[in-house]
């Protein structure tokens, strides 16, 4: 299917042929013939258009734990679709070939084709992931709506850099979201990554209040965000919403423009201790061989055990602890 260049939402005319995109914190002022920072929203004759509407760069069936989501149907598989473009420019992006460029081979699909693909795969959920889905909000919302009509759940894996109107639209048809909260330092967020801390915390707050299942990931980058104060700030903020929000502290590995050596295991363990002063469920990610268990908050027995992507859910029974019968914050 060929590209369908559609008119976008979340913009207004900005005079002299410019358009102003209001989807994210950058609020790009785009000249005729130009594109926004994310590369996928463009000005054509004084209108904001979407040349990559429905352009998919990757499709795979992944364990839900890879998103990562640990408290949302553990052990299940999710039909995962990726796009091109991103509104951030993280210099350690592991998907930089598709996030920082639009030259990857893409296939144009309709929301219904995603639904048909997911059904054929046997998955019960579709994840919008890999590059940044929010810059394709119009298409992702259509796909989530089609998925819900077809009885499929929707998962969003995002940097959370969407302003309130787009954020509300995305969360309306979303069942679970994993948001990257990359730092607790506005300067590093803005200058090194191109993000905005306030926009992300607002997105997380909205997701929590909307009742969408929420988990948060922080990639621990040595020399960037690996001090106790940052993780204390992140975990404290999340705990004010709910001490049951799972936080994934993932180890960075050298990638793209960063050559700094990988995050030591000892750093992740130390920071997990800091976060654990605020939150009940803190997980170490990207550490091979690390066991990650979910314990019952009431009796301490193992609800879910994980080794790599091998998952054992025998400690769960109908959404309760199989041992003590307490209701637990894991959707299964
Ligand atoms: S979504 Fe893209 S075009 Fe719109 S403000 Fe953000 S970076 Fe700019
Ligand atoms: S927000 Fe995610 S996809 Fe975008 S550049 Fe950063 S790591 Fe890559």
Image (cartoon, rainbow, N blue to C red):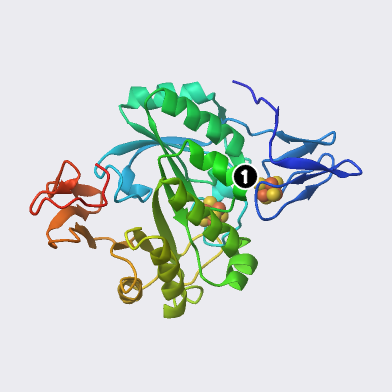
Residue at disc 1, secondary structure: helix
Q: Quadrant of the C terminus?
A: top left
Is residue 262 among what the camera can see? Answer: no
Q: How many marks?
A: 1
Q: Is residue 323 left or right of residue 318?
A: left
Q: Nearer the viewer, residue 90 or 202?
A: 202
Identify the residue shown where x is 62% and y is 44%.
165
306, 1: nearer the viewer = 306
**Residue most extreme to the right:** 16
Q: Is residue 331 visible?
A: yes
Q: Residue furthest left?
A: 323
Picture quadrant where residue 246 is located: bottom left
Quadrant of residue 10 within the rendered picture: top right
Above-or-below relation of 210 to 258: above
Q: In the image shown, does 300 or 270 lie closer to the viewer?
A: 300
Q: Position of residue 239 (x, y in %)?
A: 38, 65
* Residue at mark 1: C-beta within 8 A of ligand 1: no
Residue 14, given in percent of the width and then of the height, sits at: 84, 45
Q: Which residue is depicted at the point 66% across and 25% down?
A: 4
Q: Is residue 32 left or right of residue 119?
A: right
Q: Which residue appears at 25% of the width and 53% of the height?
A: 308
Query: Could you classify mark 1 by the number of other residues whose Cα lies within 10 Å: few (under 14), some (14-19), or many (20 or more)?
Result: few
Quadrant placement of the N terminus: top right
Residue 271: x percent and y percent?
Answer: 35, 74
Residue 171 coordinates in the image, percent (x, y)? 50, 42
Say above or below: 185 vs 21.
Answer: below
Q: Which residue is mark 1?
A: 165
């Amino acid at each position: 299917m060929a590209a369908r260049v559609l008119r976008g939402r979340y913009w207004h005319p900005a005079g002299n042929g410019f358009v102003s995109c209001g989807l994210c914190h950058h609020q790009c002022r785009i000249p005729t013939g130009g594109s926004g920072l994310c590369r996928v929203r463009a000005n054509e004759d004084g209108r904001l258009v979407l040349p990559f509407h429905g352009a998919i760069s990757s499709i795979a069936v992944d364990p839900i734990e890879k998103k990562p989501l640990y408290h949302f149907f553990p052990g299940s598989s999710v039909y995962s679709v990726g796009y091109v473009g991103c509104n951030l420019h993280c210099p350690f992006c592991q998907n930089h070939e598709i996030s920082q460029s639009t030259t990857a081979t893409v296939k144009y699909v309709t929301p219904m084709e995603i639904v048909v693909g997911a059904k054929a795969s046997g998955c019960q959920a579709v994840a919008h992931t890999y590059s940044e889905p929010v810059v394709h909000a119009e298409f992702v919302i259509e796909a989530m709506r089609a998925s819900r009509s077809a009885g499929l759940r929707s998962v969003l894996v995002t940097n959370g850099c969407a302003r309130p109107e787009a954020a509300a639209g995305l969360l309306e048809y979303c069942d679970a979201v994993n948001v990257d909260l990359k730092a607790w330092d506005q300067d590093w967020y803005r200058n090194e990554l191109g993000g905005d801390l306030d926009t992300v915390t607002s997105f997380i707050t909205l997701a929590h209040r909307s009742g969408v299942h929420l988990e948060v990931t922080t990639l621990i980058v040595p020399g960037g965000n690996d001090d106790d104060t940052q993780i204390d700030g992140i975990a404290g903020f999340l705990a004010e919403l709910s001490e049951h929000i799972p936080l994934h502290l993932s180890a960075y590995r050298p990638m793209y423009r960063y050559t700094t050596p990988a995050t030591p295991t000892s750093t992740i363990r130390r920071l997990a201790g800091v976060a654990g002063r605020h939150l009940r469920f803190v997980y170490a990610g990207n550490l091979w061989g690390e066991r990650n268990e979910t314990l019952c908050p009431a009796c301490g027995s193992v609800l879910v055990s994980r080794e790599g992507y091998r998952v054992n859910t025998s400690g769960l029974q109908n959404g309760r602890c199989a041992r003590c019968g307490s209701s637990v914050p894991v959707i299964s």
